[in-house]
Image (cartoon, rainbow, N blue to C red):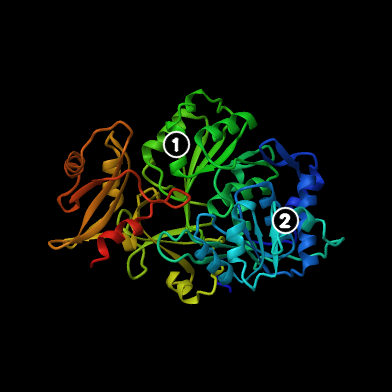
């Protein structure tokens, strides 16, 4: 599977597992990885990665085989990922939040040759390890189906056969979050991954980086800082299960310098009683992606921490990437920033032509980090592609946005989620931002629901802040007094919570289904 996408210069040894070996040679005693009270130096991590690669070869793995993992964040998880890559395999990190049925489909769809499973998911592992899986390994258990991890590692042959990694070789298959439909397997090549860990964001990281990992390894979100810190020879600290208090404690204890968090995690940090009493002076860069971060939240983060906050907009599939450095652009907090270096990001109309600045269109993008395609889904891959007048290949995002006169991108809505009420386009984000300004509102999602009079109409689903007593009607009147007549919400409903995926992205499709299923 290969697309006509931009390429990045590639030299032997540019793959991340080779870079890891280089760190082990140059700074063997520097801490590479830590979890709780346990840590590994670069030399120790390199040796254990080599054990995994050798054991995979001894078990029959060959370059290009798929190696699936199911487990929570751990040191062993990192060893397996880099060991599989060093063996020339393609990593398939399985989302622990998915159902057993969905995971079984992913294992079959990916054609995984091996499956590594943590003790907490032993029963799930038994259920999804179909006949195509030739090797099963239990990270901390052993059964007739799964070999114990340490014993497996000791089974490797020495020396490990050398593997030459090329830019077009598959790095991983990341299954989409499923917020917009059945999850798809997104294939990244090594060259695309290098474009991320050796691209413009590399300047944010150095060998003295201490990156606190607070999101799951199966998410592409985590790779943004994890792979960059690894490539630069910094230390990655694995948090484990996230809580605001655990994160703050680890930053203070480890003198953390970097972290990638999603919006819901930032909201919990700012709401924590411990936030104002923790020494955060070591923080240099905080990153956010996966879902929009509220402007007022951005402002609080830079006001109440010493870090630069960098909000990143992009797709797991790659293509468009923008970044907002909040301290540098305090007047652009509602935007997701400027196109990153080497990324061509445009806003186009239905015919694929650039829209004038300020006008709404679909966001498309082109860069060296574009996926190789959706695994086993050529039709879905083709549907995402767009060529400009010069024949250059772009990825469609399905997101609607606009660019201001300074080139900053503002997101409005998913194209398929635009509410067409009485012939007018209504963008949910406009209404959500108004309602989010109300002091009683903790969370809000606006969706389109059926209307006999207007075809569809905006409905706002609101979660109140603890102790707030605002009524649904009060919130509806507050919103409608601040928007145009065609934008008014018809109803506000109060909810205890909004459905989200593991990274805190609201599942709007799930919210809408209850209202549309009768139609």
Disc 2 crowd rating (10 Å Cα; few below 14, some 14-19, many 20+) is many
Q: Quadrant of residue 283?
A: top right
State the image quarter where residue 254 is shown: top right
Q: Quadrant of the N terminus?
A: bottom right
Q: In the rendered image of this protein, does residue 348 appear above or below residue 230?
A: below
Is residue 474 rendered to the left or right of residue 48?
Answer: left
Give the percent coordinates (x, y) of residue 54. Answer: 80, 61
Total labels: the figure holds 2
Foreground residue, 186 or 514? 514
Tags 2 and 1 in contact by the CB under 8 Å rule?
A: no
Q: Up-down: is 428 above or below 441? A: below
Numbered mark located on residue 268 in the image: 1
Residue 362, visible in the rendered structure? yes
Disc 2 secondary structure class: helix
Residue 343 lies left or right of residue 357; in this view the side is right
Alpha carbon distance from label 2 to label 1: 35 Å
Decide if residue 427 is in sight here: no
Q: Residue 155, image x and y in percent? A: 82, 60
Earlier-in-chain disc, 2 versus 1? 2
Residue at horizontal 33 percent and vertical 62 percent from the top? 415
Q: Secondary structure at mark 1?
A: helix
Give percent across and percent down for residue 378. Answer: 50, 76
Q: Residue at x 60, y 33 (%)?
A: 250
- Report the disc number at residue 354: none
Which of the image's four quarters has the C terminus?
A: bottom left
Where's residue 454, x and y in %? 15, 61
Furthest toward the right, the residue is 158
Circle 1 residues within 10 Å: few <14, some 14–19, many ≥20: some
Q: Say which of 145 and 174 sits in front.
A: 145
Q: Is residue 46 left or right of residue 35?
A: right
Query: Which residue is tagged 2?
Result: 17
């Amino acid at each position: 599977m290969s697309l006509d996408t931009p390429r990045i210069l590639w030299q032997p040894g540019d793959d991340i597992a080779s870079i890891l070996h280089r760190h082990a040679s140059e700074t063997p005693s520097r801490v590479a990885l830590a979890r709780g009270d346990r840590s590994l130096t670069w030399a120790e991590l390199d040796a254990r990665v080599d054990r995994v690669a050798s054991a995979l070869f001894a078990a029959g793995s060959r370059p290009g085989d798929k190696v699936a993992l199911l487990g929570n964040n751990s040191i062993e998880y990192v060893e397996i990922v880099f060991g599989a890559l060093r063996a020339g395999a393609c990593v398939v990190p399985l989302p622990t939040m998915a159902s057993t049925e969905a995971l079984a489909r992913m294992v079959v769809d990916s054609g995984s040759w091996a499956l590594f499973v943590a003790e907490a998911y032993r029963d799930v592992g038994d259920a999804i390890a179909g006949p195509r899986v030739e090797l099963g390994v239990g990270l901390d258990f052993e059964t007739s189906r799964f070999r114990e991890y340490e014993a497996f590692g000791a089974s490797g042959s020495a020396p490990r056969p050398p593997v030459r990694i090329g830019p077009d070789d598959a790095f991983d298959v990341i299954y989409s979050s499923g917020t917009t439909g059945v999850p798809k397997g997104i294939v990244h090549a090594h060259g695309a991954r290098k474009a991320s860990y050796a691209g413009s964001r590399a300047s944010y990281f150095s060998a003295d980086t201490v990156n606190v990992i607070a999101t799951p390894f199966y998410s592409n979100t985590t790779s943004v800082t994890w792979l960059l810190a690894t490539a630069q020879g910094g230390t990655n600290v694995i948090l484990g299960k996230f809580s605001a208090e655990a994160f703050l404690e680890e930053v203070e204890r480890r003198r953390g310098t970097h972290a990638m968090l999603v919006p819901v995690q930032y909201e919990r940090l700012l709401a924590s009683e411990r936030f104002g009493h923790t020494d955060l002076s070591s923080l240099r860069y905080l990153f956010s992606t996966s879902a929009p971060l509220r402007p007022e939240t951005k402002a609080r983060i830079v006001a109440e921490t010493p870090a630069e906050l960098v909000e990143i907009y992009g797709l797991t599939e790659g293509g468009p990437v923008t970044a907002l450095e909040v301290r540098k652009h305090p007047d652009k907090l509602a935007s997701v920033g400027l196109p990153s270096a080497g990324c061509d990001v445009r806003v186009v109309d239905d015919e694929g032509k650039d829209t004038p600045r300020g006008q709404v269109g679909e966001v498309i993008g082109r860069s060296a980090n574009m996926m190789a395609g959706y695994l086993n889904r050529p039709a879905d891959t083709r549907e995402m592609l767009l060529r400009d007048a010069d024949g250059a290949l772009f990825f469609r995002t399905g997101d609607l946005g606009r660019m201001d006169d300074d080139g900053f991108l503002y997101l409005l809505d998913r194209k398929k989620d635009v509410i067409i009420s009485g012939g007018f386009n209504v963008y949910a984000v406009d209404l959500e931002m108004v309602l989010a300004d109300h002091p009683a509102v903790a969370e809000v999602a606006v969706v389109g629901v059926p209307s006999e009079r207007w075809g569809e109409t905006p409905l706002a689903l609101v979660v109140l802040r603890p102790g707030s007593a605002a009524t649904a009607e009060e919130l509806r009147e507050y919103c409608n007094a601040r928007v145009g007549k065609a934008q008014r919400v018809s109803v506000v409903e109060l909810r205890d919570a909004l459905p989200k995926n593991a990274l805190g992205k609201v599942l709007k499709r799930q919210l809408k289904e209850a209202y549309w299923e009768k139609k």
